[in-house]
Amino acid sequence: MSAETTTSRFDGLKWLVVVALIAVAVVGNNYYADQSMLYRVLGIVALAVVAGLVALQTAKGAAFWALVKGSRTEIRKVVWPTRQEALQTTMIVVAFVLLMAILLWGLDSLLGWLVSQVIG
């Protein structure tokens, strides 16, 4: 699957609009600091959605959206482990980590004892 897109001559202007919308959200959040947090968050989310929609209209935004759609298709192809397989694998990892922790603790203790014997 190829995401062939052509760069529009208005892409730079669209990215400028995206940056302006984000700047308006940041400045507006500071300006209306005395207002309820709910209203400020809703305003930021609304401006972020509009900025995202404008960004998707650019060549890079279209390529990103094609990547997202392709990723969703690939995720559907993944064969996920069963609950039992996941549990068994987790137990093997936990056992190995505990074994390595005990070995490293023992090695550390031995080396510490040897160094204390040499130093006196």
Image (cartoon, rainbow, N blue to C red):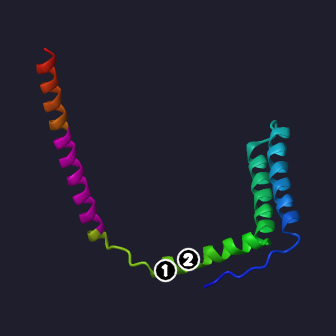
68 sits left or right of 76 in the view: right
How far from the left and from the top, in percent, is residue 22?
A: 80, 52
Q: Secondary structure at mark 1?
A: helix
The label shown at residue 72 is 2
Residue nearest the viewer, comparing 46 with 61: 61
Place of residue 103 in the rendered image (x, y in percent of width and height, measured from the top left):
16, 43
Amino acid type at circle 2 is: Arg
Residue shown at the point (84%, 43%) measured from the top left: 27
Q: Are marks 2 and 1 in contact (CB under 8 Å)?
A: yes
The span picked out in magenta is 86-104
The residue closer to the viewer here, 7 or 94, is: 7
Q: Residue at position x 80%, y 57% from top?
A: 47
As shown in the figure, which amino acid type bears the numbered disc 1?
Arg
Say which quadrant the N terminus sits in: bottom right
Q: Position of residue 82 (x, y in %)?
A: 32, 73
**Label 2: few (<14), some or many (≥20) within 10 Å?**
few
Q: CA distance from mark 2 to mark 1?
A: 6 Å
Q: Quadrant of residue 108?
A: top left
* Residue at 84% in and 68% down: 11
Taking the spot 16% from the left edge, 24% from the top edge, the residue there is 115
Does the segment drawn in magenta span residue 99?
A: yes
Instruction: State whether residue 69 is above or below residue 42.
Output: below
In the picture of the structure, the residue carrying the numbered disc 1 is 76
Is 87 displayed left or right of 72 in the figure?
left
